[in-house]
Image (cartoon, rainbow, N blue to C red):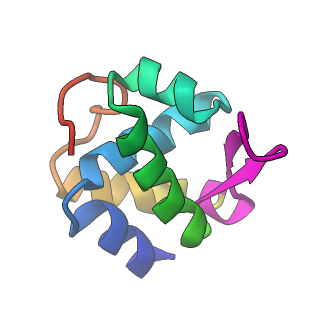
Amino acid sequence: MRKVLWWLIGGARGGRNRFRIIKTLEREPMNANQLASTLDLNYKTIRHHLDLLVENDVVEAVGDGYGDMYFLTERMESNLGVLESIAESADFEGDGLKGGDHE
């Protein structure tokens, strides 16, 4: 999981927004529209990041398609410490809910 998180968060364009999505979902499950509103990001941007996070077993969708709620996977929940260390190395610790980057 460490390698996947480094690739998704620490080493890739859009890592800051993926970090923000994970931190938001850690607090409360949300759908894509809620995430877009909460994080002040474009809906299509959120969908792109969610697709990558689902594909890499970081988040999971629960629902019937439209309006799916997103949750952290058990695997991600057990690796939150790894996420924090990567975020600290990437210098965006504490950046979980700030607006801004529209990558």
37 sits left or right of 70 in the view: left
Q: Residue at x 48, y 56 (%)?
A: 81
- x, y percentage for residue 98? 27, 23
- x, y percentage for residue 32? 56, 35
The foreground one among 32 and 83 is 32
The image quadrant of residue 26 is top right
The foreground one among 64 and 100 is 64
Residue range (magenta): 58-77
Q: Where 63 falls versus 51 (above or below)? A: above
Q: Residue at x 18, y 56 (%)?
A: 90
Q: Where 40 falls versus 89 (above or below)? A: above
Q: Residue at x 47, y 47 (%)?
A: 47
Q: Where 52 falls versus 102 (above or below)? A: below
The image quadrant of residue 10 is bottom left
- x, y percentage for residue 61? 72, 50
The foreground one among 49 and 15 is 49
Q: Residue at x 38, y 25 (%)?
A: 39
84 sits left or right of 33 in the view: left
Q: How many marks?
A: 0
Tell me, yes or no, whether the highlighted magenta stretch contains residue 31.
no
Farthest-out residue, right? 64
11 sits left or right of 85 in the view: left
- x, y percentage for residue 4? 43, 76
87 sits left or right of 58 in the view: left
Tell me, yes or no, whether the highlighted magenta stretch contains residue 59.
yes
